[in-house]
Image (spheres, rainbow, N blue to C red):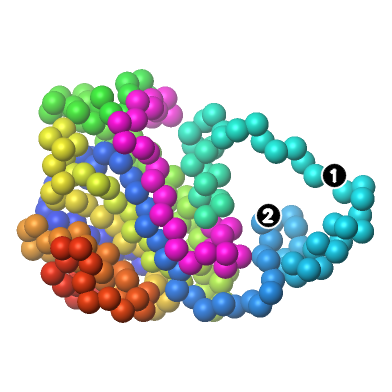
C-alpha cells in the first residue's frame, strides 16, 4: 500500500471538518463480459447472459425484499456505500467516483466516539479544548472508516495486483480551520499505487497557498487525462 501524504502547512488534521473521497481506477480490463462476485460465498465469475438465463429457468428462485431504507446506523450506511464502491471497481462498472462522508451543516452526533453534540456545532469549536478534542475524535472515526475501505481494496485481487495497487484515491476536506471557515491549509492524503505511476511513502509540503487544483491536475495526468490546466492551477506536484 502506497500512502503519500500531502499537506500545505504543518497544522493538525483535527481541524478538518468533513471528509471527501475522490478516486479513479487505472487498471486495464482484466476480464471480458463477466461480472465478478458480489460476496465471498457466490461463484467467482458469471457471464451476464448466462446469469439471466439461469434466473429465467428457475421460477422458484427467491429474491430478497428490498431494504426499507438506508441503514439507521451511520457506520453501517457508510460501510455499505464503501462496499458498493469496491464492488463497482471490482466489476469494472466504473473507473471514477466521488463520495462525501458527511454533508454540510450536519448535526449528526457520533455516539461511537462519545460525541453527543452535533458535528457542525463541534466544528465551530471557538478554540475550546474540549470541542477541539471532540472534533478530532470525529475525524479519526471518519479516517478509520476510510481505512477499512482501503483494506478491502488491498485484499481484492485485480490482474497482477490488487484494486488498491491500480487505483488513486484522494481523501481530504473542503476546509482547514472549520472554526474560521478557513480554506487554507488543506491537509490531503493520496492513496494507492496508481498502476505503478505514483511515488508513495512521502510527506510532501508544497509552497504556501499552492492551489488545490495542482494536486487534482496531477491526478488527472496520472490517469492519462491530457489537460493543460484546471481552474486556478499553476502546475503539477512534481514529487508524485
User: Which residue shows up at 85% across the image and 64% down it?
Assistant: 53
Residue 129 screen position, x and y as percent: 17, 26
| Residue situated in front as seen by the camera: 139 or 84 | 84
Quarter of the image for residue 72 reads top right
Q: Residue at x 26, y 39 (%)?
A: 17
Q: Position of residue 51 (x, y in %)?
A: 80, 63
Does 38 sit left or right of 127 as displayed? right
Density class for disc 1 (Cα within 10 Å; few <14, some 14-19, many ≥20) is few
Quadrant in which the N terminus appears: bottom left
Where are the magenta residues, as a range?
86-113
Q: Residue 45: image x %, image y %? A: 72, 68
Q: From the image, tell me which residue sits under label 2.
A: 39
Q: Quadrant of the C terminus?
A: bottom left
Which mark lies nearer to you, 2 or 1? 1
* On screen, residue 151 above or below 33: above
The residue nearer to you, when weighing 73 against 212, is 212
Instruction: From the top left corner, tell me how far across and down residue 190 is, in percent.
Output: 31, 61
Helix, strand, or loop for circle 2?
Answer: loop
Residue 62 marker: 1
- Residue at x 16%, y 46% (from the top left corner): 183
**Are the residues tagged 2 and 1 within 8 Å (C-beta)?**
no
Q: Quadrant of residue 86 in the image?
A: bottom right
As helix, strand or loop, the secondary structure at mark 1 comes to: loop
Amino acid at each position: 500500500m502506497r500512502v503519500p501524504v500531502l499537506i500545505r502547512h504543518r497544522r493538525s488534521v483535527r481541524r478538518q471538518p468533513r471528509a471527501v473521497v475522490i478516486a479513479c481506477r487505472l487498471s486495464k480490463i482484466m476480464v471480458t463480459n463477466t461480472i465478478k462476485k458480489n460476496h465471498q460465498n457466490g461463484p467467482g465469475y458469471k457471464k451476464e447472459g448466462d446469469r439471466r438465463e439461469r434466473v429465467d429457468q428457475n421460477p422458484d428462485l427467491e429474491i430478497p425484499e428490498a431494504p426499507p431504507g438506508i441503514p439507521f446506523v451511520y457506520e453501517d450506511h457508510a460501510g455499505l456505500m464503501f462496499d458498493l464502491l469496491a464492488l463497482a471497481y471490482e466489476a469494472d462498472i466504473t473507473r471514477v467516483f466521488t463520495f462525501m462522508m458527511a454533508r454540510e451543516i450536519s448535526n449528526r452526533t457520533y455516539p461511537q466516539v462519545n460525541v453527543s453534540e452535533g458535528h457542525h456545532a463541534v466544528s465551530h469549536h471557538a478554540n475550546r479544548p474540549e470541542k477541539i478534542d471532540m472534533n478530532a475524535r470525529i475525524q479519526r472515526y471518519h479516517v478509520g472508516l476510510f481505512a477499512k475501505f482501503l483494506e478491502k481494496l488491498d485484499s481484492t485481487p485485480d490482474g497482477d495486483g490488487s484494486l488498491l495497487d491500480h487505483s488513486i484515491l484522494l481523501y481530504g476536506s473542503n476546509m482547514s480551520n472549520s472554526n474560521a471557515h478557513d480554506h487554507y491549509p488543506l491537509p490531503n492524503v493520496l492513496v494507492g499505487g496508481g498502476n505503478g505511476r505514483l511515488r508513495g511513502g512521502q510527506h510532501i509540503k508544497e509552497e504556501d497557498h499552492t492551489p488545490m487544483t495542482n494536486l487534482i491536475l496531477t491526478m488527472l495526468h496520472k490517469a492519462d487525462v491530457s489537460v493543460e490546466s484546471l481552474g486556478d492551477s499553476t502546475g503539477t506536484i512534481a514529487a508524485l
